[in-house]
Image (spheres, rainbow, N blue to C red):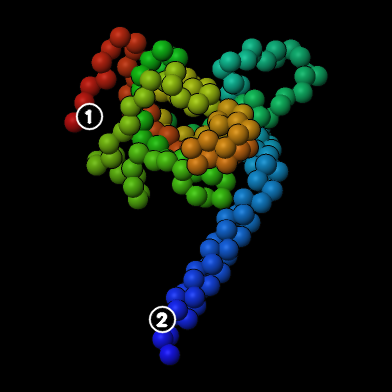
Amino acid sequence: MNKFPWLLLTALMISLIFTSCEESEVESEYANWQARNQQVTDSIAAVAEANADGNWRIYKNYRLPADDPNDLTAEKDVNNYVYCHIEEAGEGTVSPTYTDSIRVNYRAWFINGKVLDQSFRGDFNPAISVPADFALSNLIDGWITALQHMHTGDACTIYIPYNLAYGESSSSGVPAFSTLVFWVNLVGIYPKGTTVPDWQ
């Protein structure tokens, strides 16, 4: 009797089992995603507000009017702010503006630790890492907001709520309602009209 059809059927069944397990793992990995992301944002907002180590900064979405410091009754929507922890202060004294281009080393990940994007592999090594260059105006609102407060040489971990990132819809591998975490090192600022030089 030819065993090949049975082997093929067995292999197909095993493949289906593993596929369904993988789909279940993916589904469970992102189960209650919106609520989990909001919980992380709320927690980070509280930690940043307490600012126990003095290195936290909270910046309101650059598109919104600044808070009125005299209005003590105003409730803040934590999703309208980015939360920056300064890991290393640079020696620069100027911050990029909306129309500038920038060079940055960066790594982005989700709250589950899965890396979304990065400009370097492995541990960051400034001697061999090639920073990416971007027009600041082309980035997500959370990056634009945070970077307009950074100086050359600064390295920060930035927590960006979903509405300052990719919003309520899935986009380019980013699930809806994703809080994003970025480690960013600002390397250079290039005013509008200046050509960003090749990296040496």
Residue 81 at x, y = what percent?
Answer: 62, 26
The mark lying in front, picked from 1 and 2, is: 2
> On the image, numbered disc 2 is attached to which residue?
4
Q: Is residue 60 above or below residue 122?
A: above
Taking depth in this image into account, of 55 and 168 the one nearest to the observer is 168
Q: Is residue 197 above or below residue 159?
A: above
Pick out the residue farthest to the front. 1
> On the image, numbered disc 1 is attached to which residue?
199
Mark 1 nearby-residue class (10 Å; few <14, some 14–19, many ≥20):
few
Name the secondary structure under disc 2: helix
User: Can see residue 161?
Assistant: no
Q: Which mark is residue 27?
A: none
Check disc 2 and give the amino acid type: Phe
Task: Please state if 197 lies on the left or on the right of 122 as rendered.
Answer: left
Question: Going 41% across and 81% down the picture, which residue do you hit?
Answer: 4
Check disc 1 and give the amino acid type: Trp
Residue 30 at x, y = what percent?
Answer: 62, 50
Mark 2 nearby-residue class (10 Å; few <14, some 14–19, many ≥20):
few
Pick out the residue farthest to the top. 193
Residue 185 at x, y = what percent?
Answer: 39, 33
Q: Quadrant of residue 88?
A: top left
